[in-house]
Image (cartoon, rainbow, N blue to C red):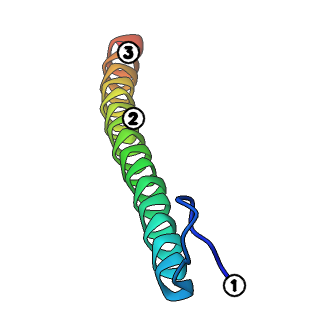
Amino acid sequence: ERFNSRGGEGDPSSDRLTRVRQDVEDVKGIMTQNIEKVLERGERIDILLDKTEELDYSASTFRTSAVR
């Protein structure tokens, strides 16, 4: 026989459902963290692209002034 935490008989399908629900919640939490990390990474990539464009402009300006 199966017993629940209150000392009565437990329903095996209810236990499975509880475990599945907990697994789903765990996966949702992990996916939320993954999405946050991807968004942060995207922001860092955007910053890096901006800095790359600034460096390219500065290099072009330097090259032009160095030739004179």
Please report whichever mark, 3 or 2, sits nearer to the chain's N-terminal start: 2
What's the CA distance linking mark 2 and mark 1?
56 Å
Task: State the mark number for residue 1.
Answer: 1
Q: Which of 4 and 49 is in front in this view?
A: 4
Please report whichever mark, 1 or 3, sits nearer to the chain's N-terminal start: 1
Residue 29 lies left or right of residue 46; in this view the side is: right
Task: State the mark number for residue 44.
Answer: 2
Residue at the right extreme? 1
Q: In this figure, which residue is indicated by the disc labeled 3?
A: 62
Question: Which quadrant would the C terminus be assigned to in this image?
Answer: top left
What's the CA distance linking mark 3 and mark 2?
27 Å
Judge depth for marks 2 and 1 and give the one in front: 1
**Amino acid identity at mark 3:** Phe
Q: Where is residue 62 in the image (x, y as percent from the top left)?
A: 38, 15
Residue 5 lies left or right of residue 27; in this view the side is: right
Circle 1 SS class:
loop
The residue at the point 62 percent across, 72 percent down is: 3
The local crowd at label 3, few if under 14, some if 14 to 19, many if 20 or more residues have their Cα within 10 Å, is: few
Quadrant in the picture for residue 56: top left
**Amino acid identity at mark 1:** Glu
Question: Which quadrant would the N terminus be assigned to in this image?
Answer: bottom right
Q: Position of residue 6 (x, y in %)?
A: 52, 59
Judge depth for marks 1 and 3 and give the one in front: 1
